[in-house]
Image (cartoon, grey):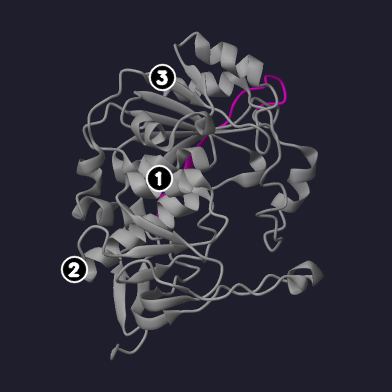
Amino acid sequence: MTETPLDRQIVVDSYALAPSRLITARSFLVDRAVPDCEEITLPGRDAPGGAIPFGLVDRMPPPPARRGWRARLRKAPGPVPLDGDLGMDCRITSPENWSHFLNIHAPLAIALMRRLDLQPGGLTLILPAATPGFVLKAAAHLGLRTQCAAGAVIGPGVAFRLGLNITIPDRRRWLEDAGTIDRLWDGPADHLPRHVFLARRGTRHVTNQPEIEALLARTGHVTIFPEDLSPADQFRLFNTAETIVAVHGAGLAPLLYRHPDAPLRHLVEILPCGHMTDFYRLMAQQVGCRWTGVRGRLKPEYVRPAYRLDARIYREHSLDGFEVDPVALERALGAG
């Protein structure tokens, strides 16, 4: 290889996020005499762009060693040869996470393949040795070649660097330009429901789920846990459903791949107060779907830190279970 590493770049345009609607649980914060839901207009903002440097390298080093005495006792994994002509080391930013892989690594790999004029299968994504099978199946569904490795990978590769302030708003355009969105489209699937409640088990679960399920059942929504579907059907679900009510989380990741002709018209995202984010609000606007947010009930321990604007509280309550006000959810469904 004669090229200097990271001597090229992918320019990422910013994206103008339009104002959106967020509905809160009923409380006396609205009126001390009559509790009601607050209906908040989330302001528009620019999702930042920037640049992603990349370049060609002769060898892909092992990822940083884990810390701790147990890790030091383990024998360092040896190098392995690259399985393919060119590799892309994706062992950063947790590619084992379903959402991270679908929303970061896969779109970037597809963009790099176009810029390097590679044919399908011409780039091998290097993933951690313990990558779950469902992530590997998702990669295969997208036509991406993978190799799992714990140590260095010997062979030519493409290296890249992601900035912390880049939200990669261009990733939808990368998928469209590469024809990925059209290639995955085969129309709505008959075996999947048209109205869906995407629920969660364990972390960030809805603590009054039976009440919410009963409410949604009246409008024809079928409860689905994403992990109960095959990876391919998780993609098909977003090309089949007309309305989706979903708890914020990785189950929403295939939204990025929704086809413009898909019937999905309204996404209601249920967000816990401990993890407010507009990640999927941005994505819904990019794929042409109406978005309405529903915020769960406040917990006392959330209130004081929320007014300390220098507090590092992003992850402190991110995975808490939480309760949803059914009236707030009914209001959100009516917004569609």
- The residue lying at 69 percent from left, 32 percent from top is 322
Q: Is residue 207 left or right of residue 50?
A: right
Q: Secondary structure at mark 2?
A: loop
Drawn side of residue 122 relative to residue 336, left or right: left
Where does label 1 land, which residue? 138
* Amino acid type, callout 3: His
Badge 2 or badge 3: first in the primary sequence:
2
- The residue labelled by disc 3 is 195
Quadrant the N terminus occupies = bottom left
Nearer to us of marks 2 and 3 is: 2
| Type of secondary structure dominating the magenta stretch | loop
Specify which label sits upstream in the sequence, 1 or 3. Answer: 1
Where does residue 135 sit, x and y in percent of width and height? 47, 48
- In the rendered view, tell whether residue 244 sits above or below residue 168: above
Res. 336 in view: no
Q: Name the residue located 79 percent from the left edge and 44 percent from the top edge.
A: 301
**Closer to the camera, 214 or 236?**
236
* Mark 3: few/some/many CA within 10 Å (<14, 14-19, 20+): many
Foreground residue among 248 and 75: 75
The answer to if 36 sits in the magenta stretch is yes
On the image, the x and y values in percent for residue 5 come to 37, 85
Residue that badge 2 annotates: 117
What amino acid is found at the position of numbered circle 2 in the picture? Asp
Label 1 vs label 2: CA separation? Answer: 23 Å
Which one is earlier in the sequence, the residue at label 1 or at label 2?
A: 2
